[in-house]
Image (cartoon, rainbow, N blue to C red):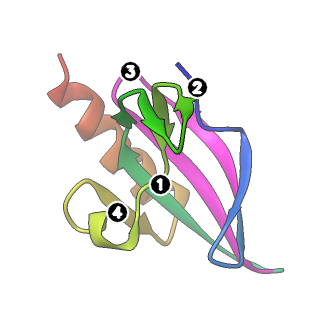
Amino acid sequence: MEHLPTELRKNGFTYTLVLRGNRSMIYRQQYTSNVDYFEVFIIKVLPSILLFGKRLPEREVFPGNEDFGKTAWSCRTLVKAMERFNKLEEESL
């Protein structure tokens, strides 16, 4: 299975992995040079598929805009992100 990278770009932002758990992840979103947000989300895995004659492996995907408020949350501070992350991780036990 392909895991999300430690750094990625999406919607014009750079995201850097902060913490990975069994069920969820935190990425730091660099909004401006002095403003950060933290994206907390449940890890979503897409199955392997055949697309245009090419096999795409089973892979983790970064949440889309429609996931926020359901399986993904944006937090203004790392403290709030950690609270959400810990709650999600506890739910997996």
The spot of residue 65 in percent (x, y) is: 38, 73
Reading the image, the residue beneath label 1 is 79
Amino acid type at mark 2: Glu
Please indicate whether residue 6 sits to the left or right of residue 62 in the image: right
- Marks 1/4 in contact by CB < 8 Å: the verdict is no
Q: Which residue is mark 4?
A: 73
Residue 93 sits above or below residue 76 on the image: above
Q: Residue at x 22, y 27 (%)?
A: 90
84 with respect to 92 (left or right): right
The answer to whether 39 is drawn above or below residue 13 in the figure is above
What's the mark number on residue 2? Answer: 2
* Horizontal and vertical percent position of residue 87: 24, 39
Q: Helix, strand, or loop for circle 4? A: strand
At a point 25% along the width and 53% down the height, the residue shown is 71
Q: Nearer the viewer, residue 56 or 68?
A: 56
Distance from Cα at disc 3 to Cα at disc 2: 15 Å
For residue 61, which numbered disc appears in the image? none
Please identify the quarter of the rendering in which residue 33 is found: bottom right
Question: How many other residues sit within 10 Å of disc 3, few (<14), some (14-19) or many (≥20)?
Answer: few
The reply to whether the magenta stretch includes residue 21 is yes
Magenta range is 15-32
Labels 2 and 1 touching (C-beta < 8 A): no
Asked whether the beta carbons under mark 4 and mark 3 sit within 8 Å of each other, the answer is no
